[in-house]
Amino acid sequence: MPVIDMDGVRALGRELSNWGRWGDDDQRGTLNLIEPARVTAAATAVRRGVSFSLAMPADENGPHDLRTSGRFNPIHSMTRYRGDTPRGEFMGGFASAEDMLIIGTHSSTHFDALAHLWYDDLLYNGSHHDDAVTARGAERCSIQNLASGVVSRGILADVPRHRGLDHLPPGTGVGPDELDAVLAAQGVVPRPGDVLLLRTGTYPRQRRGFDVEPGRSPGLTFECARWIRDHGIAAVCADNLAVEVLGANGDGPMIPFHMLAIRDMGLLLGEMFDFEDLADDCAADGVYECLFTASPLNVPYAVGSPVNPIAVK
Amino acid sequence: MPVIDMDGVRALGRELSNWGRWGDDDQRGTLNLIEPARVTAAATAVRRGVSFSLAMPADENGPHDLRTSGRFNPIHSMTRYRGDTPRGEFMGGFASAEDMLIIGTHSSTHFDALAHLWYDDLLYNGSHHDDAVTARGAERCSIQNLASGVVSRGILADVPRHRGLDHLPPGTGVGPDELDAVLAAQGVVPRPGDVLLLRTGTYPRQRRGFDVEPGRSPGLTFECARWIRDHGIAAVCADNLAVEVLGANGDGPMIPFHMLAIRDMGLLLGEMFDFEDLADDCAADGVYECLFTASPLNVPYAVGSPVNPIAVK
Amino acid sequence: MPVIDMDGVRALGRELSNWGRWGDDDQRGTLNLIEPARVTAAATAVRRGVSFSLAMPADENGPHDLRTSGRFNPIHSMTRYRGDTPRGEFMGGFASAEDMLIIGTHSSTHFDALAHLWYDDLLYNGSHHDDAVTARGAERCSIQNLASGVVSRGILADVPRHRGLDHLPPGTGVGPDELDAVLAAQGVVPRPGDVLLLRTGTYPRQRRGFDVEPGRSPGLTFECARWIRDHGIAAVCADNLAVEVLGANGDGPMIPFHMLAIRDMGLLLGEMFDFEDLADDCAADGVYECLFTASPLNVPYAVGSPVNPIAVK
Amino acid sequence: MPVIDMDGVRALGRELSNWGRWGDDDQRGTLNLIEPARVTAAATAVRRGVSFSLAMPADENGPHDLRTSGRFNPIHSMTRYRGDTPRGEFMGGFASAEDMLIIGTHSSTHFDALAHLWYDDLLYNGSHHDDAVTARGAERCSIQNLASGVVSRGILADVPRHRGLDHLPPGTGVGPDELDAVLAAQGVVPRPGDVLLLRTGTYPRQRRGFDVEPGRSPGLTFECARWIRDHGIAAVCADNLAVEVLGANGDGPMIPFHMLAIRDMGLLLGEMFDFEDLADDCAADGVYECLFTASPLNVPYAVGSPVNPIAVK
């Protein structure tokens, strides 16, 4: 795989930059590519009326460990699970149960806000990090800019199935040529505004006990940033840790694709998805497009949000 | 308004019961009414390609107070908002921000799981509460049964606009006749599988400083349960505290509609929605239907989930 | 080691019972043994004016894992770590930092409230669990009954040092005879109101990477309950998971000492302590007594509390 | 009351500075004044063997509101309150209850770490804030530096009782002369290493429904900083929001005493204490000294900690 150094990221970032493309105040980035006509066209992908969750379970069985990764798995706790009175009887005629969730916004299936990552002190569209991200959260580029949801055509790229594998081995990079090959074999022609759903087969396996080697997660190579720009892709969602391949850039920046995607292109990234059921269905009926619909929680100032994206076919 | 006592609830519950209707093991209740053909039909409601969030902001400015209501407003907290090194520089070439959310599942815009409420020791479809809801959470009827999302036609009933009001006054009950009148005036014919979106104008006002008198929240009368059953409505979502009118049942059970809806009918309820933008749009174009899409977080054993539902027109 | 079955626990529990001993309304149990004269006497143990923390660090490096033990390690999170303005400058002349803690009350060094454990539906002093412990917490025997703190003489029993070991091997039971032998060798005569500090050398090692085999934690045998009753010990604190030896009672109840201690005797238990520094000091000066002072957080209805107990010599 | 501007704070800070006094690496500040001989002397204040909690209840009834003060009251939540099996029976012979606490470290009775506040980019003893306080927390001057506890003589200054009042009115400043007068009237001579317990009667009233006007909290004037330095006081704890009087410094810095105390002097501050029971006892027996003992939770990197301080007489 090719590697890229910091100056290379800066140069490629300038080339692929969407800063100013949708105005100097824009905070939505490539979601602007989902024009109304794309939404109405996407709705026609609903043919059979079946839906698939693309989310992993958000619970303690996730891949995180605060000791090593700086993130903790979601904590779900019941706050009431009997009736309202000491004896479990009911007050006002009923009994009820309530619960709470303590969740890092990037710890299960989630979207990254454009304020999640930056370099050289500037965020997407030029905000300085001192102004954009404070103790209160994202003053610019927060997840609230996605509050009205991501509704567009989703196209699945089932890379391991195309390779004849159950899942991609750790460290596997998926480049532009392979994206082209997989999509072509699946009969999918990418269109502007599409949401690219990249299946690597990684995280769903973590829950079944596989060692997914998070530091060597398979995923996109940084060169895919140009492919995504050229095809007008509005968002990329993957079933791995960070969309891109990890541990493959030698002495260069750790996650060059992220740097280009989030900061220069304003590209929406979704991570830790689960495409297993959708992929089986696509393989069965040969249709790799869907109506993709996902919405972050409407949390002001947040730099990410857990989501449960839905694919409708 | 009519009132109903506990025996009345029991009798009406038996009449409207959906127990066994979709099998003895069913945990999805009225979502079964959203058959595939309803989903494909709902997709045709996407005409202009515009989307609306139906969620209130999930933050500290909500209506809760642990001292009085037993619930707390969502807490959003940044866990990192500078670079990865002490001086705010970047490690591996980038800087990033992360945050967490501490949220009661019923404290902002949310869906109730069918395990959220019961009476006479039995939950929807006959599970005993000792088996169904434990310290771990809902062993039966958890929110995970909605993981593949709610995708159907949404129909807005804009009651205050029909009455020529900004919002319904506290204590206002909306009965079956008014539902019929509002929908007819709006040109909407309810169909099986529809999601009824009941606008009262309540909670969006709370954020603007109005005293919404939570104990007297306007909403549906218990008699609407039969109307909902008769029309095959799959879910009811409202912009108030509890869908139904509160403080209006005299000495009878406090929330008879909830008891009938969740426990006897297995009806999905959504609460604390915000229909302001959608309602303005519907009033402007005269179209009161949409593609409604919403999905709870995929939290095992949860008895509710925050959601950000999207209406697409 | 001897084993005990459920009927044996019940019989021994009746024999050792302190129910009614300090009145029918008592919720403090053996803390009543710390009479004022014991406190003043304990203060005379302060000879050199040196203090030792007996707490493990309360952080993510603890022994818990929600996946396997049902408990999570404490989560500490900064909520502000720069100045009050976006640029890190100060408002009103200063900058400040704040943080929060998400902590299970039994997940680090802690006291058990007497409401933490019971059997046969009754808690210490006869409260029925339906009345005593509800969704709100402990209506009886909560940790608030210890709010004025535990101030008494502490006596260290350094069992591994007496055996010539670094730490007790997993599964080691410490019985009454060994307690007598260790204390005698150390020159300590137990007195009523004393706090017994049992060193096993277990948990401090967990933080240094040792596998402490939590299910086989070394500790007291159930027979020590009688020894504790006979000597008028007011509290037992240990540097293991559960004070008592685990995995050593065959087909009998899992933690018989807990059942006898908390429910029948009303004995205060402290767990996951760290005696390493204190023990080194005691070995050096030959003085195994101290002024022991510890206070739970003043949390109403709590069934436990993290503590940082202090030994003063 | 006199006011002080930023330059005045800087000048007075230099005059009162303890930087370097206990070495260039010191992170404990005035706790160094509690020499061993002070601890042994303090133990002689234990005469009657009675203890008093100096902590407010840590629960939802505190004074905070995330909407207005940026802090939330402690959240206590049961995580299990029935037996371990669905039917409330017991597994392994027993039933148990557990709970968790979500608590801002400065939201109830607490100690401020020396890393809690600074100005002109430098913390106590000269650390630069970029090095000292990061996303991980306090790399310097964390609360862990107090892990072995604060054990010394406590002296109560019951200002409202001396004035013949129930509590000090909002905005009341207590200056050095009044401290002298109150202590003299109480027969207390301050000694180096003492912990000054300042009673204003403020926060205990908040829980009884009084409007305590947090922005005008009564407390020490900034001039007391010199008095404290001169008398060698090791810590100051008060039953108000911020030890010092608030809203009384005109256009100058908001909390000049904090700036001098924490950053320049390295003085330990305790806030939101409750001295009601202790004060009644002192008034009754005429003895205003006690053994003061308090220890923060042993949380690495924390900038504060909830505490339950104990006064023993």
Image: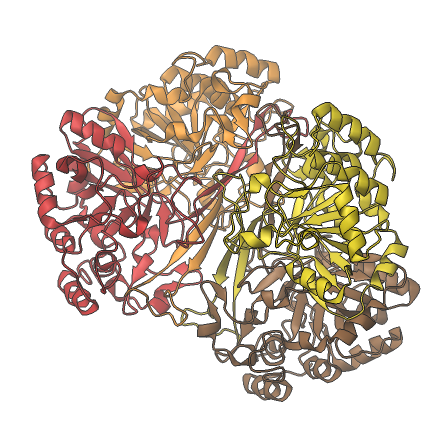
Chain colours: A red, B orange, C yellow, D brown
**At which x and y percent is residue B193?**
32, 22
Task: Tell me the quarter of the picture where residue D198 sits.
Answer: bottom right
**Image position of C246 with respect to A124: above or below:** above
Pick whichever, C232 or C247, lies toward us: C247
**At which x and y percent is residue C230?**
85, 41
Task: Tell me the quarter of the picture where residue B296 sits.
Answer: top left
* Residue drawn at (71%, 62%) of the image: C283
**At which x and y percent is residue B209?**
51, 50
List the single residue furthest toward the front: C164
Pick whichever, D217 or C141, lies toward us: C141
Task: Tell me the quarter of the picture where residue A126 sits.
Answer: bottom left
* Residue drawn at (84%, 71%) of the image: D163
* Residue drawn at (40%, 12%) of the image: B21
Q: Is residue D224 visible?
A: yes
Horizontal arrangement in the rendering, residue B29 relative to residue A42 (left or right): right
**Image position of D260 with respect to B98: above or below:** below
**Image position of A30 with respect to B218: above or below:** below
Horizontal arrangement in the rendering, residue C220 relative to residue A81 (left or right): right
**At which x and y percent is residue D288?**
85, 69
Quadrant where the C terminus of chain C is found in the figure: bottom right
* Residue drawn at (60%, 46%) of the image: C169
Quadrant where the N terminus of chain C is found in the figure: top right
Q: Is residue D77 visible?
A: no
